[in-house]
Image (cartoon, grey):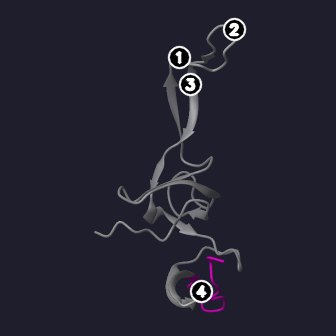
């Protein structure tokens, strides 16, 4: 299975299924080898953490401590459960790839696959 994904860090995506279906958010981490993405403030899970000291946080004073407790953090989602939102037409879309010649080099660009849009996603 190829490890390239058409969804990248910083893209606006919409969740297609699960408890957050229909919500939109930015991709904060892409994991191509696992075929997963982490979306900001969506698919939150609770993580129980214990307090731990921070090394070399400040030269003066005592060591600072990261507080423990129950923390909500976003978990990874399969890339097949998210769909990129086109920045031009502002609708969820499939992604096509076209090649373009820029300054003598062939560059692959992502494009919106909607019939009435077809604009480039990468500017």
- Residue at left 69%, top 74%? 87
Residue indicated by mark 4: 114
**Disc 1 from disc 3: Cα separation:** 14 Å
Label 1 Cα neighbours within 10 Å, binned few <14 / some 14-19 / many ≥20 = few
**Disc 2 from disc 1: Cα separation:** 17 Å
- By secondary structure, the bulk of the magenta-drawn segment is best described as loop
Q: Earlier in the sequence, mark 3 or mark 2?
A: 2
Label 3 Cα neighbours within 10 Å, binned few <14 / some 14-19 / many ≥20 = few
Mark 2 or 1, which is nearer the eye? Answer: 2
Label 2 Cα neighbours within 10 Å, binned few <14 / some 14-19 / many ≥20 = few
Q: Are marks 1 and 4 in contact (CB under 8 Å)?
A: no
Q: Earlier in the sequence, mark 1 or mark 3?
A: 1
Q: SS of the residue at dot 1?
A: strand
Q: Earlier in the sequence, mark 2 or mark 1?
A: 1
Residue indicated by mark 3: 70
Q: Earlier in the sequence, mark 1 or mark 4?
A: 1
- Residue 113 lies in the magenta-colored region: yes
Mark 1 or 4, which is nearer the eye? Answer: 1
Residue indicated by mark 2: 61
**Disc 1 from disc 4: Cα separation:** 50 Å
Task: Pinpoint residue 88: horizontal percent, then vertical percent.
Answer: 71, 79
Residue indicated by mark 1: 52
- Residue at left 57%, top 70%? 84
- Residue at left 70%, top 74%? 90
**Disc 3 from disc 4: Cα separation:** 42 Å
Task: Point out the image quarter for the C terminus.
Answer: bottom right
Task: Pinpoint residue 8: horizontal percent, then vertical percent.
Answer: 53, 64
The residue range painted magenta reads 111-123
Q: SS of the residue at dot 3?
A: strand
């Amino acid at each position: 299975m190829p490890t390239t994904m058409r969804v990248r860090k910083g893209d606006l995506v919409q969740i297609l299924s699960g408890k957050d279906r229909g919500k939109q958010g930015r991709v904060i981490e892409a994991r191509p080898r696992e075929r997963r993405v982490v979306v900001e403030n969506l698919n939150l899970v609770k993580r129980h953490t214990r307090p731990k000291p921070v090394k070399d946080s400040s030269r003066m004073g005592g060591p600072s401590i990261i507080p423990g407790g129950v923390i909500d953090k976003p978990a990874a989602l399969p890339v097949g459960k998210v769909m990129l939102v086109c920045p031009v037409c502002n609708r969820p879309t499939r992604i096509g790839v076209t090649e373009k010649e820029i300054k003598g080099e062939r560059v692959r660009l992502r494009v919106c696959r909607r019939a009435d849009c077809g604009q480039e996603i990468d500017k």
